[in-house]
Image (spheres, rainbow, N blue to C red):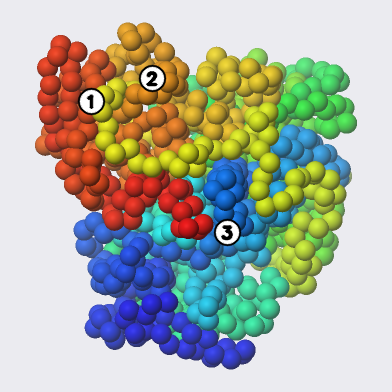
Amino acid sequence: MSDAFNTLDSFSTGAGKAHFASLKKLETALGGSVARLPVSIRIVLESVLRNCDGVKVTPEHVKQLAGWKPNAERTEEIPFTVARVILQDFTGVPLLADLAAMRSAAQKMGRDPKKIEPLVPVDMVVDHSIQVDAYGSRDALDLNMKIEFERNMERYQFLKWGMQAFDTFKVVPPGVGIVHQVNMEYLARGVMEKEGIAYPDTLVGTDSHTTMINGLGVVAWGVGGIEAEAAMLGQPVYFLTPDVVGVNLTGHAKPGVTATDVVLTITEMLRRAKVVGKFVEFFGEGAAAMSVTDRATVANMAPEYGATMGFFPVDEATCQYFAATGRSPAQVDTLRAYYQAQGLFGIPSAGDIDYSQTLELDLSTVEPSVAGPRRPQDRIELKSLKAAFAGLMDMTVADGGYGKAGELGTHHALPASSREVMDLAGGGSQDEPVPVPASEEEMLDSHPSPDHVAASPGTVFGNGNGSLGHGDVVIAAITSCTNTSNPGVMLAAGLLARKAAALGLKPPAHVKTSLGPGSRAVTEYLKQAGLMDALEQVGFSVVGYGCTTCIGNSGPLKPEIDKAIADNDLVVASVLSGNRNFEARVHQAVKANFLMSPPLVVAFALAGRVNIDFDNEPLGTSSAGQPVYLRELWPSDADVVAVMGAATDAAIYRNIYADVGAGNPLWDGVPAPAGAVYQWDAKSTYIQQPPFFSGGKVATPAIRGARALAIFGDSVTTDHISPAGGIKPTSPAGLYLGEHGVQKADFNSYGARRGNHEVMMRGTFANVRIKNLMIPGSEGGITLKDGEQKPIYDAAMQYQAEGRPLMIFAGEEYGTGSSRDWAAKGTTLLGVKAVVAKSFERIHRANLAGMGVLPCQFKDGVDAATLKLDGSETFDLEGTESGITPQQDVTLVIHRADGKTERVALKLRIDTPIEVEYYDKGGILPFVLEQLVG
């Protein structure tokens, strides 16, 4: 720590003294009022202060952030150096591939490959690959995990190699839990220590719901792969100074109202308040009285309400959570002492902090709720659901309804159940039937289209019978870290199940039930509370420890149910305790999807339909022939408190996490290569050595004779650019897989194959909705070369063979949407040297610069349209020959087909000195390689 502001101080812990960068001393040094800054801003400020090295982080950065004003114009970028990084297996594989490729490059350079190590701790949790194939029986978990390992063997071998090859890259194997819940229960440190300096646990993760850890007072959010890679390799993550919206929680929830009801209400409220891109910080007596697990449920859904974070400061409840989940007394003491020494301990009261905007929610006004049928912010009070669903059935499709007026109540007999061996695929759609909010796009790419695995439906599924109609529940899933991390709602589900089982209630045969806990701790405390048996009796057996239905890994429905839905165009429903419910994502045949608390999932499973008024209609009939109402089954708050002790038994957590992944014979049985350097398999279609380090790539000194690969209009998103969804057989990626002996049924999704750049570069700019204006009226990833229409990939490869550089032209807001590493990686691999646009989305612009592509901005109302570019031109870019400086002017020279030449001034959008360094080395990855091995 350079201590530019003389802020080094010490505090006492049970183990002695520890040093830290003091915000109180910084306040004295600068003469400002740091203590009135939002707590989340102060934690970021501590990182900027501690990492101020005069190069990547300057004293000016410290002063700028310390002088944060609630309503200033936001132009400054903050260089935020995080303490650690978390990954899930889908987004993490390409990062591990890049690390492995760096080691191969170091070895080729004659350097020690072991020097390539992440510079901060990195934890990957394998949670995105388990699918609900088997359900409703005690052997479902075992069957699903066996199928999971069969499907994912190649990726798991690679991950297992990574486990033994790196010291700071750890893998939590399959079957342990969901990344965000494991982060809460095990990975979160509270306070870190390095070289004698204590500092807050902060992180970024390659999954949007990384925000769940905000409930523990940890500053964290989801980022794309390139930002995560930068953080992993010791580089700052840059973000625009944010507005901070304070949410004052007052009062207490009424009896029977769950944390899920609260978060659905907050999601609706904050969506309306337009908090997109802002920090949200909760304060007030209601926040202080919330349990940490309730706070985590609220924080988890920050992507759904659109915020960067949903932050709760550290207080005594945080310390109690750390103790209850098996952390050592010394760790808890250090957490408390550090935050007290910094003046950051405790939930602020009204008036303590200066926020950009203050909102208020009286928790006593929250009602039992669900959200759906298509968006998480569309909350419906439970008592109104029957009427709301009927209204949607009657409403026309054009108005957002289902256009099925008069059909509700009609039932169709189910065909006889098939006994033939079937292929197990199913789950959410791989393609995007309708545009979805930017915060939800990321899931499309993190959801496997599972390889087809044969299984006998006779042993895996029960047989269907009876009939099926609109509004019937076909999937009921207790799923997702949003709720399975919360003992209050999980125990409530178990208590409701126990009462239902005692009365002989069971779900109808058309309901596919599943329990996918976010960690093994959940199963243990449900067993200790005597509730696991009851959940199994009403169909909720454990199906896997992973994201399951919440990310679309819901697995197949019974064939006869699938057929009845398709033949009769039925609007059937899923009920799930997840965080996302856009159409066709939970399951491609299920149009209506409702988010709700785990006890309500059990209740709707028993009822078998969503068009029910629980106040006035029974959800079932007891074995004694009596009608049973929800109010008879719903547990009281006192019932939940009586069993809560099981969930706060620190011994459970210590036992589970003492040796993570031990006792998993499937993982033990994965044959994995050993050694520091990965032995790449040229035949693999999942993992290939990425070419970012081959041949000492350096920046192109000047661009001469370039051609336009594509000319786009406004608002081209990273989803248009990046490969996502299913792989079409006729696409360049599909043809590549076919040539390598992969059957169409085994193509899987781009997301599953993102460790293979050969697949990913073929899918770049291949989106069916992208419009290349070089071919007016066209849609899809095609371009013109020599007057002939071709896939963009094919044309790019032909240009590369000719040694010709390429450029992309675009309109406003190029690269909006979720940050996607392959949107920039794919661009550079296609041979694109510059992207010229009217404006850029901030993160994608930085990602392009980080991958060695020059982002350039048109000036003064000029664009591709006013210049009448059509793709017949060649281009030079002048002004970069003798090196570049941030935001310098460059000149685009247009050589037209008729021999005329035109010169246009552009602004180079390499914005910072560190980006110049990245570009000069050919990108951030070669830059870091040189830093690490010299």
Give the structural element (helix, strand or loop) at label 2.
loop
Q: Amino acid at mark 3?
A: Lys
650 vs 282, left or right, is: right
Residue 508 drawn above or below residue 114: above
Of callouts 1 and 3, the N-terminal one: 3
> How far from the left and from the top, in percent, is residue 914?
33, 55
Residue 632 drawn above or below residue 293: above
Question: Mark number for residue 115?
Answer: 3
Query: In the rendered picture of this protein, how many numbered marks are placed on residues?
Result: 3
Q: Is residue 73 visible?
A: yes
Q: CA distance from mark 1 to mark 3?
A: 41 Å
The front one of 889 and 571 is 889
Residue at image point 70% right, 65% down: 640
> How far from the left and from the top, in percent, is residue 736?
58, 20
Q: Amino acid at mark 1?
A: Phe
Q: Amino acid at mark 2?
A: Glu
The front one of 468 and 900 is 900
Residue at image point 78% right, 32% down: 509
Within-10-Å neighbours for mark 2: few <14, some 14–19, many 20+: few
- For the N terminus, the quadrant is bottom left
Residue 926 drawn above or below residue 170: above
Of callouts 2 and 3, the N-terminal one: 3
Residue at numbered disc 2: 802
Q: Is residue 581 visible?
A: no
Give the structural element (helix, strand or loop) at label 1.
strand
Q: Quadrant of residue 38?
A: bottom left
Of callouts 1 and 2, the N-terminal one: 2
Residue at image point 75% right, 21% down: 560
Give the structural element (helix, strand or loop) at label 3.
helix
Residue at numbered disc 1: 875
> How far from the left and from the top, in percent, is residue 786?
33, 10
56 vs 229, left or right, is: left
